[in-house]
Amino acid sequence: MNFKTTKMYYLGIILQFFVLIVDAQSTEVSRINPTNWFVGMKNPNLQLMINGKGLKAELFKLKPYKGVKLREIHTVENPNYLFVDLEISKKAKAGTVKFEYNGTTINYELLQKTAQPLGLDQSDFVYLLMPDRFSNGEPSNDKFADMADPNHDRNNPFLRHGGDLQGVTNHLDYLKELGVTGIWMTPVIENNQPLTDEGGVMRSAYHGYGFTDHYNVDKRLGGNEAYKILSKEAHAKGIKIIQDAVYNHVGINHWFLKDMPSKDWLNQWDKYTNTTYKDQPLFDIHASTLDTKIVRNGWFTSFLPDLNQNNPFVANFLIQHALWSVETFNIDAWRIDTYIYNDLDFMNNCNQALLDEYPNIHIFGESAVGTVISQAYFTKNNFNIPFKSNLPGALDFVVEEGIFEALNHDFGWNEGVSRLYTVLAQDLAYADATKNVNFLENHDHHRFFSVVGEDFDKYKMGITWLLTLRGIPHFYYGTEILMKNFKDPSDAEVRRDFPGGWADDKVNKFKANGRTEKENEAFDFVKKLANYRKNSEAISKGNFMQFVPEEGVYVYFRYTENQKVMVIANTNKTEKSLDTVRFQEMLKGAKSAKEIISGVEFKDISTVKIDAKGVMVLEIN
């Protein structure tokens, strides 16, 4: 979207409300959100957003239904909306509630609450994938002429490629074999967006971050039913589902932007104002009010309008959709997009609503920051400060940076692996650092294998750290088969299709016989360590103790009373001989161990030789 188009669109968002409110001749209900609700919820309150033409509060009635009361009907500036407060008590049973509007009966389904989120913990291994780029299980839904973006072209890196939820379902056994216990997909909610001009290139919203109808999964991915099937079959195989939540913004083509309930539905400015993407003003005690406002209320991009979460109707809409999603699709955990740009009080309320209803659910946020202090500020922390976040965990961007520093720079006082050690030494900032989600890359970053110069030894060391450090590891699709590339000239280069996900692919890397020898070596390495961690008490439940790196060698332990795992990494370009007397605090005289990756038994670990750029995972006997 060029500047001229952006400016015209933005002014349209401000002005369209005043134009559309006068177009309200007939009286009819066309939409209710949430589309259904549930009995058995701990919170009895529900707010329906009713959309139609020229709606009148006095014409909306609730027919008698045991356990359901109509508390209040709110009107807003736009007469095409009503907001109806209901109370659904414990006496209410599943069934069809009937409303009446202007003589017409409207059926509204109440279903039984059934979801029991499993959450995430250190025993899990999360696999991040982009459905459009993973596998095409149902070619008939690749494109639709009635959508704002009717395009489909695998030869164009910026258009949709046809991957879908059935494609993910088809490869659950592949993921289970790899050791995956959780699937995080980029958003699957409808993105009925037109192509947008980004950097002079017209791009589709295949990534999923521009919602246009919260209560519909995109039909190009298979719709709501395909998502339910994936969730059911994944759970049957012991794989959890993590949903990607976007609260900060919606797509420019969202249905409620075409006729906004009120001008303050969005964060409005006199002229287009983008966020600065600077997290510091939100916690800086010296920050200006203006800087803080721009970070929080500025738009993420011109084609992703910024929701005003201080509007109570907006807040209720977003929170109820989160609860509805957990129930409808049996979601186990939430990843929250662009966490720091949301209103943080709203986020606390939203997080708490999920945690109150589903105590086992895990929630972690994307705060793309560069320091532990900043990352901890947006998470449950140990700071004595006025604002206290209740977000359980964070995507650990600082650990990712520490791993890259350790792999790509020589050892020094503050350099190389000393940086990773220092980052982890600051875990005292978090209420519980084990709830953080570690990663080596994602759909917005360079591919890990390219970042380490396609050095297989560095690849194995990084994977070992990811799968054995404190916290919950997440993987990016294709890293197990050495998919590579930098974001050059665009992020499309790190979002290429998984080879074998389409019927006409020349090779199928979901199968061992379709992978090269080196790709199979990588796959088997990840598979062995990922499956080991699931059954390792020390890694899945244990504590973490690290030792100051010396001469480029970094040692840490994962441990419980019943098991100890010692990880040794030699970041040098030469072999090292390690005297383990320094680690007797943990070894306590133990003499032998089994190296998990190679399977080699060590009868004497008083001295251990480690190859150049080598890593060892020793289960202490």
Image (cartoon, rainbow, N blue to C red):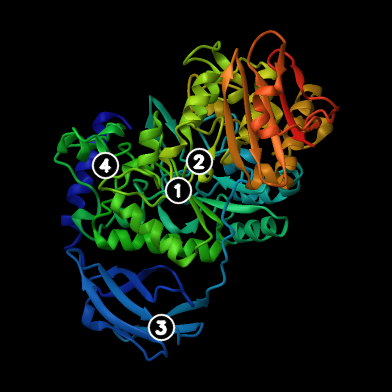
| Circle 2: element type | loop
Residue at the far top: name it.
Answer: 574
The label number, if any, that marks residue 89 in the structure image: 3
| Circle 4: element type | helix
Residue 593 at x, y percent in the picture: 80, 32
Name which of mark 3 and mark 2 comes first in the sequence: 3
Looking at the picture, does residue 221 appear above or below residue 102?
Answer: above
Looking at the picture, does residue 287 appear above or below residue 551?
Answer: below
Residue 298 at x, y percent in the picture: 25, 39
At label 4, the amino acid type is Arg
x 36%, y 35%: residue: 374
Name which of mark 3 and mark 4 comes first in the sequence: 3
Residue 593 visible at all: yes
Name which of mark 1 and mark 2 comes first in the sequence: 1
Q: Classify mark 2: residues with Cα within 10 Å, few (<14), some (14-19) or many (20+).
A: many
Q: Nearer the viewer, mark 4 or mark 1?
A: 4
Q: Quadrant of residue 53?
A: bottom left
At label 3, the amino acid type is Ser
Per the model, the C-alpha gap separating discs 4 and 2 is: 26 Å
Q: On the image, numbered disc 2 is attached to which residue?
A: 206
Foreground residue among 444 and 464: 464
At label 2, the amino acid type is Tyr
Per the model, the C-alpha gap separating discs 3 and 1 is: 35 Å
Per the model, the C-alpha gap separating discs 3 and 2 is: 41 Å
x 48%, y 36%: residue: 396
Residue at the far front: name it.
Answer: 589
Residue 508 visible at all: no
Residue 143 at x, y percent in the picture: 55, 46
Q: Is residue 118 left or right of residue 248?
A: right
The label number, if any, that marks residue 296 in the structure image: 4
Q: On the image, numbered disc 1 is attached to which residue?
A: 191
x 61%, y 46%: residue: 122
